[in-house]
Image (spheres, coloured by chain):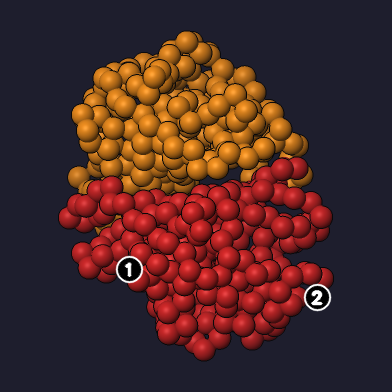
Chain colours: A orange, B red
Amino acid sequence: MAGFTEATAVSDGTAQLDPQWTVGGRPNGGYLLAVLARAAVSAAHPHPLSASAVYLSPPSPGPAAVAVETLRDGRSFAQARVRLTQEGRTCVEALFTLGDLAAAGEPQFVAAAPAPVAPRDTLTRTPVEPPGAGIRITMLEMVDQRIDLAAPGDLRGWLSFADDTPFDPFSLLYAVDAFPPATFTLGSSGWTPTLELTAYVRALPAPGPLRVRQYARMVTDSQLDQVCEVWDADDRVVAQATQLAIHRKR
Amino acid sequence: MAGFTEATAVSDGTAQLDPQWTVGGRPNGGYLLAVLARAAVSAAHPHPLSASAVYLSPPSPGPAAVAVETLRDGRSFAQARVRLTQEGRTCVEALFTLGDLAAAGEPQFVAAAPAPVAPRDTLTRTPVEPPGAGIRITMLEMVDQRIDLAAPGDLRGWLSFADDTPFDPFSLLYAVDAFPPATFTLGSSGWTPTLELTAYVRALPAPGPLRVRQYARMVTDSQLDQVCEVWDADDRVVAQATQLAIHRKR
């Protein structure tokens, strides 16, 4: 996964935020969460299990400082706080639980069957400049996203890397924030900046396109929440997320 | 709400963790989140809108230090990090979005209808020492909790203060972590310590008992997630939460 892995690398506490993973010129929130996760993991705890971020101020592409504070370092789990700053401004802060998904074990009970989605070959790839969006979604050059407008407030579809790179626990953090806001199906095309995003990575994903469902539960005049669930090609729940966002009508 | 409000007060950076709000002698995670929220709010931003905590080490009843760092202080929203420590040990750290729920506005779209629950008067109040639980749930002296075993992995029921104190945005943070783990309905009665809990408070609750639904989406050998949704007496979604917990079979 050269593209995404390189674009999320953190070296000596510095990330180079990639202009490729942007929407309207700003780095995507899930991409930023993956950058923070890359800084947080260790050999003993190689994967993000939970990631909870507050988005404070949108960074620009370019260098950003990433600082990690370990809060707990146990045998099975570690927990850490990670802060991304740019030119002295804190842009994102997140709390992580870290562990090894190879040790997550087999599902004993699953109540989250894959959402029905139209077959992938019957849907069209979302263009980088969707008609009417009024914004350039540069990251769509890198991913093949196909949307199925399942129901009002309920977006479903398929997501894969354009070069078929398999997903990993870091790019799953991107997947949970990749789709357009569910308000897109409610006649409200305004910007919905994320206040808080929490993602759980539940399993190592099998190769192949992901099925994604993103739905709003309550939209008010000022805020909305969205739930995102992601299944891999083996029909397994691999990521779950929830976000609270500002709702600005346009 | 003398009981809960007093028990969650933070004065000069110190909370007195109340032995009343414990399970097996340890403060409940939702109660702790309410303590942190009390420290985070301000006159301009009086309510928690989002709260995301990692649980590092369970504190004991008694004094604990609560430190707040403001991350963003905007007109409509503030964001803050709060850390609870006891005897130099960090026990809980959480990120908050703060605002004014009176300004949250009216719902425009709601996909989260109240879960069907058996009528409250047909259910019995959970005792402080439930048969077979092997643990004293001291906090159940303070709340009237009535459980409806809706389906495997899906707990529903009613929650109110025993003295009918109305809920507020702080006690809603307790409500989302008050119920037994949904694994309780799956024949697994073990302890499920929370790794991460994220709650959104969506509206000021109307007086009266809350309806609560808590369900697991995937339980593995080592972890489970739970979603909690809370409706007030006016059938309005007032709180939403998700948690990732350790799953230890017993």
Residue position for label 2:
B131
Is residue A118 visible in the rendered image? The answer is no
- Give the SS element for disc 1: loop
- The residue lying toward the viewer, choosing from A222 and B241, is B241
Res. B73 mark: none
> In the rendered view, does A249 fall on the left or right side of B143?
left
Give the amino acid at mark 1.
Answer: Asp
Mark 1, residue position: B12
Image quadrant containing the C terminus of chain A: top left
Amino acid type indicated by mark 2: Pro
Q: CA distance from mark 2 to mark 1?
A: 41 Å
- Return the disc, 2 or 1, that comes first in the chain's sequence: 1
Q: Quadrant of residue A82?
A: top left
Q: Image point 25% across, 48% down: which residue?
A: B72
| Residue furthest left as drawn | B75
Q: Residue at x 66, y 65 (%)?
A: B180
| Residue that sits furthest to the bottom in the current view | B163
> Comparing marks 2 and 1, which lies closer to the viewer?
1
Dot 2 falls on a residue whose secondary structure is: loop
Residue A176, placed above or below residue B238: above
**Above or below — where is B65 with respect to A76?**
below
